[in-house]
Image (spheres, rainbow, N blue to C red):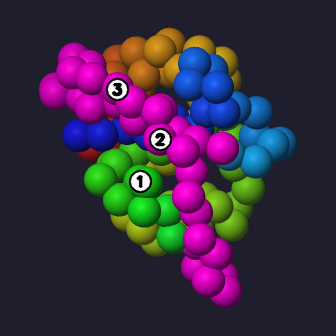
Amino acid sequence: MKIAIESNDGVTIKSPFIHTKGYLVYDIDEADVISYEYRESKAKNSGEKVTRPVLTDCNTIISRGMDRNHLRLFKEEGKDVFITFKTSAKDAVRLYLKEMIIGNVPH
């Protein structure tokens, strides 16, 4: 499973009030992080639909907040969205995995 975290610096989760420049993508096996990488955002806007080829292999998006339109678009793409107040990407992944293990987050 792959988890994408909105990040503009490859370390912290970006503020919900600024444009997303990229994503930290974590490859997860059960409850362990296997690897991670930074991918620059290459979103293409075609009318109302926004495609994000950089996220096609990701199941979940972690964010500090997003507008309803982006939330709807991610849901339409079949992605789960996990909102956190954490600023550290590593902390957010740990929290997500903990929640997933105790059964509060679908995977």
Query: Mark 2 or mark 1, which has the lower sequence index?
Result: 2
Q: Is residue 68 magenta?
A: no
Asked if the residues shown at circle 2 and circle 1 are in contact, with their CB atoms under 8 angstroms apart, the answer is: yes
- Which residue in the protein does label 3 denote? 36
Left or right of 63, for residue 54: left
Query: Mark 3 or mark 1, which has the lower sequence index?
Result: 3
Q: As shown in the figure, which amino acid type bears the numbered disc 1?
A: Leu
In front: 69, or 46?
46
Asked if the residues shown at circle 3 and circle 1 are in contact, with their CB atoms under 8 angstroms apart, the answer is: no
Q: Is residue 43 magenta?
A: yes
Q: Position of residue 105 (x, y in %)?
A: 36, 37
Q: As shown in the figure, which amino acid type bears the numbered disc 2?
A: Arg
**Residue at 42% in and 67% down:** 77
Q: Quadrant of residue 22?
A: top right
Q: Position of residue 49 (x, y in %)?
A: 58, 79
Q: Position of residue 61 (x, y in %)?
A: 48, 44
- Which residue in the protein does label 2 denote? 39
Numbered mark located on residue 55 in the image: 1
Q: Which residues are the magenta region?
A: 21-50
**Residue at 64% in and 75% down:** 45
Asked if the residues shown at circle 2 and circle 3 are in contact, with their CB atoms under 8 angstroms apart, the answer is: no
Q: Where's the N terminus, which quadrant?
A: top left
Compute the Cα span from label 2 to label 3: 10 Å
Q: As shown in the figure, which amino acid type bears the numbered disc 3?
A: Tyr
Q: Is residue 75 visible?
A: no
